[in-house]
Amino acid sequence: MVTIKEIAKQLGISASTVSKGLNGAADISGELRHTVINTAIEMGYTAKRIKNSRHKKLCLFLEKTSYEPAVQCSLDIVLGFQQAAACEGRDIIVIPYPISHNITITYDAYMLKHGFCGAFFVGSFPKDDWNSEFTSTVIPTVFLGHHCLGNPHTCQVSTDLYGALGIGISHLKSLNHKKIAFLNDAGNPAAIWLQRAYYMESATHGLTAPDSMYACTTPLGKDAGIYLRRFLQAGVTAFMCGSDILARAVIKECALLGLSVPRDISVIGFGSFASSALAIPPLTTVGQNWKALGRGGYYALAALFQEITVSQTLLRAELILRDSTAFCRQ
């Protein structure tokens, strides 16, 4: 195990100065502190420090966004993470990201400099200067919906998207729907995985899913009417949507065409936002438990602290039945 004395010997300075550099003392220069932190990381001191039971401060990086579904769910994710962490006496600091367009310090150095022993990223995968560093970081780091392959110090937590699409398609198939379209949400970081899940789960349930029954549109569904007409021409009788907001946009467009939901068309959303229960008709949706995702993020991080290599944690989705689906009589 690397010690403060060994770092001091490497740098040719006193152990007390190294300690000050690692703990953010104000009476040493920023340049020297930066040198101490980078040397400590290179020598493997970070890995030792994060195992220290007294070192309890965690960072939750929360993506800056005005995307409504993300804003709605993020607070619940943060709350779930905080509740789980509080039970073990951990302190949580929430930091919006991207932090800066010109980050001049490495990810590991940033974490050590600010006294963090682990992190949870909520939002899109960071695209700043830290992006390439996550494959080699030694800081326990959990990502919501994203994964750094090959790094035992990182983990992904997400909803099982294949299972989520599967229970929605299974429900519609049980209602005699044979042509089920999927309108994906381009604003969802998991859009590509939802697309793959749609095609795979359709095949698993013995249903055809040609490209004419798939589309990806804006988060607010401004083009929903265009795709609705295209899908109807393909004989579609049911829609799965990449978000509850898109599902509500489809229902609105159906009304403009004189179609009744669920009498003429069945619609299922994704996400289970609170407002979906108040829609007309109340929206059937594949629900994600946002607080559980937050708790899962903490438990995955706790496993990494114990050197338990966790690659991926998937939470089951649930079908929340309301009034926007019905038996197909075609």
Image (cartoon, rainbow, N blue to C red):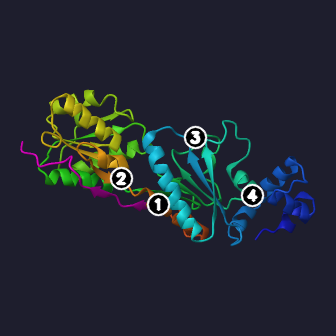
Q: What's the CA distance linking mark 2 and mark 3?
A: 23 Å
Q: Secondary structure at mark 1?
A: strand
Q: Residue at x 78, y 53 (%)?
A: 38
Residue 312 is marked as 1
- Residue range corresponding to the magenta coloring: 312-330
Q: Amino acid at mark 2?
A: Leu
Mark nearer the N terminus (1 vs 3):
3
Q: What's the CA distance linking mark 4 and mark 3?
A: 23 Å
Q: Residue furthest front?
A: 278
Task: Please tell me which residue lies in front, 82 or 157.
Answer: 82
The nearer-to-camera label among 2 and 1 is 2
Q: Amino acid at mark 4?
A: Ile
Residue 29 located left or right of residue 164: right
Q: Position of residue 308 (x, y in %)?
A: 55, 70
Residue 127 is marked as 3
Residue 110 located left or right of residue 274: right
Q: Position of residue 286 (x, y in %)?
A: 31, 52
Q: Amino acid at mark 1?
A: Gln
Q: Are marks 1 and 3 in contact (CB under 8 Å)?
A: no
Q: Residue at x 56, y 52 (%)?
A: 121
Q: Residue at x 71, y 71 (%)?
A: 54
Q: Position of residue 288 (x, y in %)?
A: 38, 55
Residue 161 is marked as 2
Q: Amino acid at mark 3?
A: Lys
